[in-house]
Image: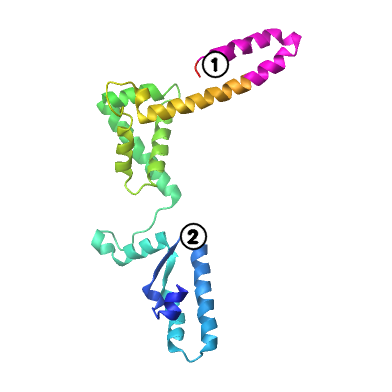
Amino acid sequence: MIQKVLKDKIDIDKLLVVTFTNAAASEMRERVLDAIYKKLDENPEDENLQKQIILLGKSNICTIHSFCLDVIRNHFFEIDLPANFRIASEQEIELLRQEVLEEVFEELYETEEGKFAKLIENYTGYNGDEPVKEIIFQIDKAIQSMPFPEKWLNEKVQMFEPQKDKKQDFSKSVWGEILLKDLKESLLDGIYHLKIQKEKLEKCQAMEKSAQIIRKRYRIIARFV
């Protein structure tokens, strides 16, 4: 930025500089201003440098969120937004998400759609449908970091199908292989801890019955690895 402003003579308000945080944007402004002042000390009569100090106040050095908000405020009429629109707080957004999900669930319960009924049956217990809602919230939160959330989600759902032959079992799919690998790691971890407990118990004759139980569990788990 300093190179472009001081050497290339580009007005600072013609640059768009986005940062991750407001603190980073403020620090960047200070650094640029310090560089201009140092250069101005060398040449106090430089009108361009004096101009840059004035332009710095309206320069686009901000977070990406702030920049996008300014664009919307200046062009709200082109996207059919009211002039007095505002950004919802995190608490408001969370309430809206919950309300929308409740409405969707009510509609699905009324239609008694087969796939939805099966989903509820498989992922809920005596506590109601809260576990399913929590899964949906987690998925929604995760996909929002993607540029095209629905497209990304559809692609990942398709990966549940086996790669070559749809008649193959789920373990042959991309996700099946990942889950089996994760399960194997969990089993190996369990075997490791059981082995430690088994060795400790075998050293104590009074704990022989407990040692027998641990040895039995050890042999059962070891068969699956």
Reading the image, the residue beneath label 2 is 21
Q: Residue at x 67, y 11 (%)?
A: 211
User: Mark 2 Cα within 10 Å, few/some/many (few <14, many 20+)?
Assistant: few
Q: Is residue 129 visible?
A: no
Span highlighted in magenta in the image: 195-223
> Mark 1 is on which residue type?
Ala
Q: Residue at x 62, y 11 (%)?
A: 215
Reading the image, the residue beneath label 1 is 222
Depth check: give the residue in front, 185 or 110: 185
Q: Residue at x 31, y 47 (%)?
A: 148
- Marks 2 and 1 in Cβ contact (< 8 Å): no
Q: Residue at x 71, y 12 (%)?
A: 202
Q: Is residue 199 visible?
A: yes
First in residue order: circle 2 vs circle 1: 2
Name the element at disc 2. loop
Left or right position of 36 against 202:
left
Left or right position of 100 against 191:
left
Can residue 204 be found in the magenta stretch? Answer: yes
Depth check: give the residue in front, 13 or 179: 179
| Coordinates of residue 130 in the picture (x, y in percent) | 42, 30
Task: Say above or below: 90 vs 13.
Answer: above
Name the element at disc 1. helix
What main secondary structure does the magenta stretch of the protein show?
A: helix
Can residue 81 be found in the magenta stretch? Answer: no
Depth check: give the residue in front, 38 or 79: 38
Label 2 and label 1: CA atoms lie apart by 50 Å
| Coordinates of residue 163 in the picture (x, y in percent) | 30, 29
Q: Which quarter of the picture shows residue 197?
A: top right
Left or right position of 215 against 84:
right
| Coordinates of residue 149 in the picture (x, y in percent) | 33, 44
| Coordinates of residue 178 in the picture (x, y in percent) | 42, 30
> Mark 2 is on which residue type?
Thr
